[in-house]
Amino acid sequence: MAKDTSSSDLLRGTLDTLILKTLAWGPRHGYGIARWLEDVSDDMLRIEEGSLYPALYRLEKRGYVESEWGVSELGRRAKHYRLTPFGRAQLQRETEDWTRFAQIVSRVLSTEPAS
Amino acid sequence: MKRSNKSPLWQRPAGSEVHEELATHLELRTKEYVDQGMSQRDARRKALERFGDLDRHAAECLREAGIRNRRWRLVAWLDEVRQDLRFALRRFAKRPGLAILLVGMLALGLGTSLTMAGIWHHAFWKKLPFSDPDRLVTLWEEQTTRGKGLNVVGPANFVAFRDGAKTLDQLAGFITVPASLNAEGVPPMRVGARWVTEEYFEVLGIPPAVGRTFRPGDGLLEDPAPAVISHRLWRQHFGGRRDVEGEKLKIDGIPYEVIGVMPPGAALDLGPARAPYGDAADLWRPLPVTEEWATQRGRWLMIVARLADGSAPEEAHAEASGIMDRQREAMPDFNAGWIGHAIPLAEVLREPLELPLTALGGAVLLLLLVVCINASSLLLSRNLARAEELGLRRALGAGRTRLARQFFAEGLLLAGLAAGAGWVLALGLRRLSAASLPEHLAAAASTTEGAVWVAALAAGSMLIIVLALLTGLSGLRAAARPGSTRDFGGGRGRHRARAGMVFAQTALALVLLVGAALMLQTIHRLLSVDPGFDTDGVVAFSVSPPRDYGPERMSNFLDQLMADVGALPGVDRVGAVTAVPMAGLGAGTSFAATDRPEPDAADWPVADIRVVEGAYFAAMGIELVKGRNFDSSDHGEDTVGSVIVSRDLADDLWPNGDALGKGLHINWGDPARERRIVGVVETVHHVDPGTAPRQAIYFPHAQEPERRMSLVLATQRDLAALAPELRGSVAAIDPTIPVYDVHPIRSIVRGTLADRQFLSRVVTAFGALAFLLSIVGIYGVTMLSVTESRQEVGVRMALGARPLEVVGLFVRRVATWTAAAVVVGLSGAILAGHAAERLFFGVSATDPSVLVGVALLVAASALIAAAIPARKAARVDPSRILRWE
């Protein structure tokens, strides 16, 4: 996502949901999350990778994820994140919200002007 | 806000943790690109691009994690320092050679500084073990016409001081004499017996470790007399038993009863230069002050006194002078020309140590400077070499403070290692110096306060850390200018700093080398002074029979002993004397010739007095210039005594050479008894080779008996084999008499040079080390310069410059620096030389041959050290150089 500050709140919220969804597939470190999103979206979802981390910290602060230090594939220390039950519930809520939102928007956009 | 964090308590997310997390991400992304075929550099750049603004994201993370908590910050900071230390350790392990060199040098500087600090503390700053030691003064007399300095006090004047001094609370007089301790089943031991007036312990204010000290009335007890023993004697002889009170001792034949034990360090020793018998005390016994003291002649007392409340040392001094003024009037013949002094005790103890210890301290300081400069230089080069790496770390988000902390950690590590090694070194040096330092300095070296060492170590460590920080930060500055490692212009500034440091070292080394050269010359000159006697093939030992040896018994004892010793195989000639030359101060007194009007009492010349027996002069190799040695014709009962005088005395009084048969009045024994000169011997140095000899008068033992004599024998035999035989000879006559101070004359003479010899060894060692370091430094700097100027050299040579011109290019640069270093160094050497003038003998502090010689040596070495790498530069093929870039 581009550095578009006008829609930053919406975008930030979406990023959070995406991260939670990624972690629903299993614990990962930040790079792993970025790669998963890349692979799943066929590299069409271009995120500024650095912004993942403040997001992760936010999520951790809220209790949706918990972190643990481990070792990366290259032997360096890396922080792994994992979804908490609380986070899992939040993911459920946000997925429902997003789906409903998308349905509403879709309905509005699919209306045709009367001709 | 629940922090669900599995990490242990001490691993809160900290700034470095955030950075580490992000760095891992970048590393992984970079690897991905590299695996796709990108170059390392491109991959990293792309990864950074993709990541976005590293600093901003990191800051946001920190904000989210709420790192405003101060406690977390401290723990985080410590954690980072720990990481830094680990990193620094890893880096040192990668270049162990450099690390060892750095630590080794710094440890050397620290270790020597520690030892020096300990010595200084003990000699100058440590509080004396007496109560309120600043209120203690010592009293002395001085003969103004002779100008020989402080002299011990006469009993008559002691009484005058004691009764008349209002600025002094209490006075105590004392004298220490060598005595023999006799006990069952052990060989007789030589001890120092200190006779003290009853106020002694009160004046000094030392409580006894065991038992009590003297109280009024103790001076009258005689059989047994009360004795307080030293801590050392208590341990050695009584095994440190607490129930030692009441134990009996026999010293010099006198029975004693132990009433108390002194704590360690209580034996006040005013030093060998200050007393005829400057022994450390093993035993204190009362010295009764009788009525006769008020009129007694002779000077033999040392006095220590406590200032009255509110009095200052200067007032005591003025008062002592005044009292001596009155004494000069009261006893004009005895006191004419004598004045009084009151000097604070601390000053008297400190004075003989000042010059040698200051010189030693100066040498250590110079070494420390050289070591610091060298270490900085090494650190600087290393940090400059990794300027690129530093720049990259900057780009990866490490802040400037972060990097500064890295340097701090390196400095901490270095300081820690160097401190540890330095401590060990200092312990070794302490043992070494206690063994090789001259005696009065050795005491200062063998005891140290842990606190002093810790303080010195802390100061040294901080210095190292500051150095590491400074050199690191300047490396950072170099990194901030990208490409400056190759840039000739940027290089020059750094090069100048390095060159400056190397040449500062050269200047310092020069100062040390000049000092070493002067000291070596001094030793050489002193050793080549003809002392007037043979230094090789002569051996001496001392005996101290008990008090009940009267003159006749002593005489018989001596004759028997000399005969027995003379009969030993390999012993050629034997004689006896009261004090062997250069073994410490002996007695002296004033005299006058009888064949001319007597001068005023104050103007009587003074001569060293010795009592001799047997073939003393022959054994010592002292030439008999005229007349004869003492023989059986010199009886004790003769009305006119016989004396032998030294050549300078004879020449002084009778320049036309007819001293034989002339008469002298001497203030010794019976002053009224006339003495006739029967022989003239060569003048002898009695104090040390560097001090001008004084006129000497020799008495025959038969006429002036003495109880403590030293035997002198000429022998080619090795002393180790001979010594037991000598002891055996004495024991065969009287087993209660101890034999001590068994030395070859040569070692006695060398003993007088001990101070200077030690100093010269140290300064030479330091000078050589500093010199080596600076030459290596010059080589290194030139090498660096050569590598940096590769391009320029290539260009010049391609344009037709000859190899010699290229060499000259570098050597010229070095020559200017060397010239500056030599000028600064010589100035420093001249200044230091002036300050230490008294140390030198036979050579001036500004001796031009020494200065020029050392300067030439240093200059030549510097130029050669520069020429070698310069030649290498000139030999490289210019086309290769130009292509390389």
Image (cartoon, coloured by chain):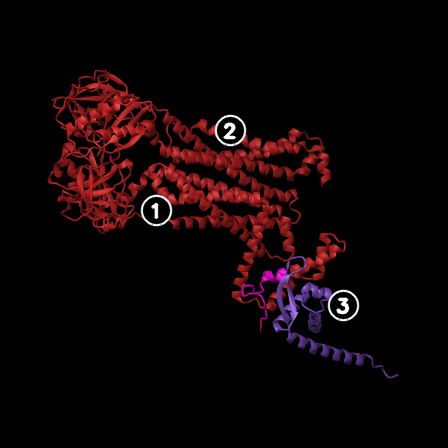
Chain colours: A purple, B red
For the stretch drawn in magenta, what is the main secondary structure?
loop
Q: Is residue B634 above or below residue B545?
A: above
Q: Which residues are magenta?
A: B3-20
The image's mark for residue B431 is none
Quarter holding the C terminus of chain B is top right
Q: Do marks 2 and 1 share a subunit?
A: yes
Residue B737 falls within the magenta-colored stretch: no
Whichever of labels 2 and 1 marks the residue nearer the N terminus, that label is 1
Considering depth in this image, is B406 or B17 the residue closer to the camera? B17
- The amino acid beneath tag 3 is Val
- Residue linked to disc 3: A40
Picture layout, residue B861 above or below residue B492 = above
- Residue at which label 2 appears: B856
Q: Which residue is mark 1?
A: B125
Q: Vertical placement of B548 versus B201: above or below?
A: above
Which chain does the residue under circle 2 lie in? B
Horizontal and vertical percent position of residue B407: 56, 52
Corner quadrant of residue B569 = top left
**Closest to the observer: B815 or A20?**
A20
Say few, some or many: other residues with alpha carbon within 10 Å of mark 3 (under 14 / 14 to 19 / 20 or more): few
Q: Amino acid at mark 2?
A: Leu
Q: Chain of mark 1?
A: B
Q: Looking at the image, which residue sits at the far right? A: A115
| Residues behind callouts 2 and 3 on a single chain | no
Q: CA distance from mark 2 to mark 3?
A: 80 Å
The crowd level at tag 1 (other Cα within 10 Å; few <14, some 14-19, many 20+) is few
Q: Secondary structure beneath disc 3?
A: helix
The kind of residue tagged 1 is Trp
User: Secondary structure beneath disc 1?
Assistant: helix
Q: Position of residue B362 (x, y in %)?
A: 42, 39
For the point 72% across and 77% down, the residue is A95
